[in-house]
Image (spheres, rainbow, N blue to C red):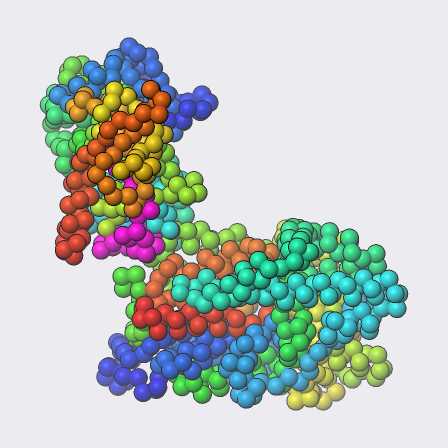
Amino acid sequence: MANEAANISLEGASAHRIEGGIDAIVIGAGVDSLAAAAYLGRAGLRTVLAGAGPEIGGRVAAREIAPGVEGIDGEHLITVLDPDVIADLDLYRHGLEFAARRLDTTYFFERGETLRFDGDLSYAAYTSLEDDDDREALEAFMSEVLETASFLRPAFVPGVYPGGDPQPQRTLEKALGQASPELMSRIRYFLAASAEDILRARFEDPQLCTLLLAETAFRSAAPPNEPFSFMSLIRRYAGEAAGLQGAAAYPKGGATAVVTALRRAAQAAKVDVRAGAPVKSILIEGDRVAGVALEDGGQIRAPIVVAALDAQQVFFDMIGPAGIDIGLQRALASARPEIATARMQIILKGVAQDEATQNNMMRRLLYAPPLEAITAAFIDARAGRVPQRVIVEAIFPTVLDEGASLDKRQVMSVMAHPLPADEAPDAKRREQIRSAVFDSIEMFAAGFSGRIEADDLWLVSDEAVALKSGIGAYAAKPNVLKQWALASAATSAGEINGLFFCGPEAQIGPGLSCAAGRAAAKAALRAFKRGAP
Amino acid sequence: MIFPAEDFFADAPRPTPLFAAVASVSEANLWTCVNGWTAARVYTSVMQEYDTAKNAAVLADLGPLARYTVRGKNAAEFLGRLTTAPAVSLQTGESARGLMLDDRGFVLDLAEVSRLSDELFLLTLPSPHARHIALAARGLSVAADDISDQVAALGVFGPQTADVLAAAGLKSVSETMAASEVLRGVETAARPIQFGAMPGVELIFPKDESLTIWERIMRQGAGRPIGLDALEVLRLEAGAPRPGLDFAPAASGGAQARTPEELGLAHLAPLDRGWFNGRRALRRLAGLPRRRLVSFSIDAEQSSPGAAVFCDDKAIGRITSCAWSPARKRVIAFADVDGSSRGNIYEISASSPADTRVAARRFETAESALARVFAGVQGQKSPRTTDFRR
C-alpha cells in the first residue's frame, strides 16, 4: 500500500516534493525501526521507513574488517530478542535461523581455573560444580533469579507511550499485588542491594561469586558494588534466546540475519523501506506531528511518526529545544556517559588442534577478572583511564556458523568492558584499549597474541560517527532504575500527539531487543485507530 | 507582580539595594523576609498606606523579586516556551503577564515579560528559578542572566503615578510602554507593571545609585512607601493569587499543584496560542478543574487562613489568605474549594465563638472578571481574543 501512496508532486522534483497519503513514517534504519514498521504495515497502515544511511540495519552492519573478511558491527549474540516480535512478525519464516543456540559459557579466572555453565541456566550447577554445597547454592540462586527475572519481564518493556498498551504494566501490577510475601521481599532486596552484597552473602566459592559479578557488571555502567546494580543481571536473565530464558544464541549469518529477517517482514507488510533518505526535521503543527521534512527539501506528510534514532537527534535536532517540554530536556540532559563497551573482531591464524580449545570455541567465553580488578576497572574507566584488566566476552563466529568459516583462520568476536566512554579517542588511546583487551584475553588464551593476523577495534565513538549521533545513546547504560526514568521520559515524547519514540533510550538494558519498536508500534496503532492523530 | 509568601524561618535576610532608603522612612520598623531579602511589612500604618495607594501614589521596594535579562536571537522563543506570556508577539516596549508551568501543566510561578529591544527582554518572577531557566535555555541561542543582585527596583502605583514620575523628571515614562531615561545622570529603565489590578510603573536602576533615585522621587513629596501588609489587601481586592500562600508552586510536588484554570488564571495560559511548556498536558486537563481558587467576602470582622468553607452546609474547602478590606467593609479572602461544588449559600467557620459559621459570598475581582470574559470568548471559539497584552 505504501508504494501506492499518493504522490502529489511532480515526478523527479525531489527537492521540493511533498508526499501525502502516508499513514505512518518510521525514522531510522535499525532493528527497532524495522520491527515498528513491520507492525504498522501488517496492521494495514501505509508506512514509509526512512533510513539516513545507504544501508538498512543501523548499528548492526556488516563491514570489511580485513581484506576479504567481513565482520559485523553492533551485537554478536542474541540474548534479549523479544520473543513476541519473533512470533508476531514470523521472523523464522522470513529467514531467521540460529546457527548455535543454548550456548554454554566457559568462565575463565585469573589463575587459569575455568568453570562451565550449561546454556540452560537451570542446569548450570550440574555441569560446572562438583562440590555439593556449591551446587546446591547455585541451583537455588539460579532458580530464584530466573523466577524473579521472569516475573519482572513486563517491567523491562517500555510502556508509557501516550495511549500505549498498558497491558504489560497492568500484568505486572496485578502480579505484584498477588505475589507471595517471600517473592516481594526478594524483589525488594534484589532491587535495592548491590550485586556484590547479594552474591557475597550467597556464595562462599569466590569463583562463583566472581563470575556472577562479572556477568552482572558486563555492559553496565553500574559498578557491582553500587545499589541497584544487581538489576542488570535480572534484566539480562529476563530475556530469552531461541526460546530459552537467560540463554545466548548465535544467528546464522550473525546479527545481520535479524536485520534481514525484519526487513523481509517489513517488506512483506508492504512497508516502503527507503535507505539514503535522511530526515531533517519532524513537522509539528499545533500539538501534533504532521510528518517529516527530508534533507533533500522534500516532505512526507503523515499523522504518525515513529522515531527510532537516539533521543538527542530526535528531540533536539529534529524537533528543537523550543518545541519540547523542559522536563523532557532535563531528563535527556543526563550526566556525560563515562563507561562504554568496546567491540573487537580479531582474525587468528591457524586452527586449534586440541579438543578442549575446539570445544571452547563452540561456546561463549567470558573472562572474569578478580572482584578487586573489576572494581578498579570501573574506577579507572570513570576517571577516563584505560583499566589494566577488563571483562571479556568472546565467541568464534567462524566456528559457530559453518557459513562463516574461513580457510585456516578464525574470527574471534570480542566485547570488552568497562572502558572509558571517549568522545574522540586518538591513536594512542586506541592502542591503550587494544593492549588492555589483548592482555585480558591472554589471561585465558596464553599465546593468543602470536596468532593475530589482523584486528579491528570498534569503539562507541566509531558507532556514534557511523550513526551521526552522540556517544551517550550507545555508551553503557546506567542502573536499571535510571534507565526506567529515562525510558519513561523519552517514550512519553513530550506528549506530542502522533509521535512515538523507540530509540536506544527507550530500551532497558543492552542487546538486540526490538521490544521498544514493538511497544511504539502498538501505541501508534492504538492512537491511529482512535483517530487521535 | 505579586510577592511570594514570606520566609518566616529565614536566617539573616539580605538587605535590598533600597533597604537603607526605605528603612529611613519606616516608622513601624516591622520587617519580614521574602526570597531571602528584607522586606517591610508596614511603614506607617496599613490603612494609611492603603489609602495612599487608592488615592495618590505609593512606592514599593520590589527588590525581593527575581529578575532576569534575556538576550539573544532566540530570546522571544525562549520566553514563549518558558512562560505563557506572548513574548514572540510583543513589540518593543510592551509587557505581558503570564505563568510558568511545569510539564504536567501545573503552575510553577507567575511571570511578567517586557520586551526592551528586538533581542533583549526583562523577565520578572516572584521567586528565582535559575535551574529551570538554565535548562530551558539549553540548545537555544539565548543568555539569561540573573540581575536581581545588581539592580534596585522601585514600584510606583496609584492614580497619581504619572504625576509622581513627572515630578521626579521621568517625563517620557508611561504606564503602557517600557522606556529608559537618564535621571540625575543615572540610566533608569521604566516599564509598566501590574500589582493585581492596579497598574503602575517599575523603575529599575543600578543598585549603587539607588539612594540617588530614591531621594529624587521622595524629594518631590508625592509618593509614600507601602509595605507588604497593605499590598496584601490590594492583592486580595484585585483577586491575584499569591504563590506559596494561595497555591503551592508545582515544583514543591504533592497534590497541591494547581492548573491555571484551578487558580482562575486560565486567561494567562490560552491553549489556542503558540506553544509553551506544559501546554500539551494542559490541553488534557482543560475543563476538568479538581479545585477552584475563589474570592469571598465574609460577613465578619476577622477570619483566618485554614478556616473551613461550606457550601449548602457541606464542607468544600478552606481559606488560604484573607484581610480586612476597607473598600468592601468586610473581610475578603481567597479560598481553595472543591472544583465540582455548586451552590448558593456559602459559610465560613468562625474561630470565636467556637463551632459557629458566618455568611460569605463570592465576589468578582478584576482578575475573575478577566477569566469570565476569557471563558466566554473561548466558548464562542473566537481565535483572536486571547492576547492579554497591555
Q: Is residue A34 above or below residue A130?
A: below
Question: Residue at 18% of width from left, 22% of height from top?
Answer: B329
Q: Is residue B131 visible?
A: no
Confirm whether the magenta stretch covers residue B286: yes
Q: Which residues are magenta?
A: B271-296
Front residue of this view, candidates A187 and B74 = A187
Q: Quadrant of the N terminus of chain A?
A: bottom left
Q: Is residue A124 above or below residue B266?
A: below
Q: Is residue A250 above or below residue A530?
A: below
Front residue of this view, candidates B106 and B139 = B106
Front residue of this view, candidates B28 and A389 = B28
Front residue of this view, candidates B143 and A109 = A109
Residue lying farthest right?
A: A131
Task: Give percent across and percent down for residue A117.
Answer: 77, 71
Confirm whether the magenta stretch covers residue B276: yes
* Quadrant of the rendered image containing residue B369: top left
**Left or right of B182 in this view: B100:** right
Task: Give percent across and percent down for residue A255.
Answer: 59, 79
* Quadrant of the rendered image containing residue B231: top left
Task: Give percent across and percent down for residue A103.
Answer: 72, 77
Question: Residue at 48% of width from left, 84% of height from top?
Answer: A265
Q: Is residue A13 visible?
A: yes
Q: Quadrant of the C terminus of chain A?
A: bottom left
**Left or right of B231 in this view: B247:** right
